[in-house]
Amino acid sequence: MKKTVTYVLVADGARARLYVNEGPGKGLYPLSGATHKADLHHHSRDVKSDKPGRSIDAGTGQRSSMEPHQDWHRFEKHKFAREMAKLLDAAAANKAFDRLVLVAPPTTLGDLRMELGEQTLKLVSGELAKDLTRHPDNELPQHLGEVLAV
């Protein structure tokens, strides 16, 4: 009988670790080389390309600056989720896992769902809306009980 391989992605908007479970009682172990970090340690002002544009109020002739409607930290977090989705899509295409469990804060979960390909989404067997990225590896199984028999 073929073993069922479950990938567990533990992520937030800036960090992600990928784990493998090969069935109940088999535990959880980190996938080699599957720790990812986004560079979010900068200020929004450092990410923007230049000063906001200016507009002229036709009534008064005065110029005022136009603030962009972009939250750059949010943009970077969504971009990170897109990168993680690409990695998972590639692994799914290579049949590296049979099931996928996503563990992330609600916003990141939404970003991941939006970016994952259709085939990968079909493999999602559980989701946990929590940020467990700062928990040590040995504590993860106790948090995953409701979505995965570790």
Image: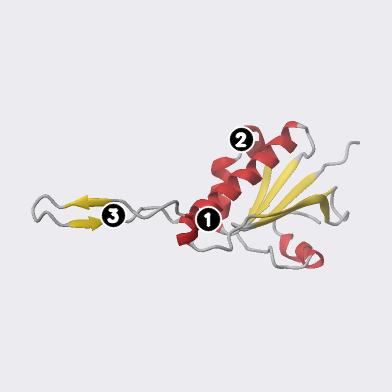
x, y percent for residue 90: 71, 35
* Residue 116 placement, left or right of 44: right
Q: Which mark is residue 107?
A: 1
Q: Which of 39 and 123 lies nearest the eye of the viewer?
A: 39
Q: Residues within 10 Å of mark 2 (few under 14, many from 20)?
A: some
As drawn, 6 above or below 66: above
Q: Which residue is mark 3?
A: 66
Amino acid type indicated by mark 2 = Gly
Instruction: Name the residue located 55 percent from the left edge and 62 percent from the top edge.
Output: 42
At numbered mark 1, what does the secondary structure look like: helix, strand or loop?
A: helix
Instruction: Name the residue located 61 percent from the left edge and 33 percent from the top edge.
Output: 118
Instruction: Name the residue located 65 percent from the left edge and 37 percent from the top edge.
Output: 122
x, y percent for residue 116: 61, 40
Amino acid type indicated by mark 1 = Thr
The answer to whether any part of residue 20 appears in the image is no
Residue farthest along the left direction in this orientation: 59
Q: Residues within 10 Å of mark 3 (few under 14, many from 20)?
A: few
Marks 1 and 3 sit apart, C-alpha to C-alpha, by: 28 Å
As drawn, 95 above or below 145: above
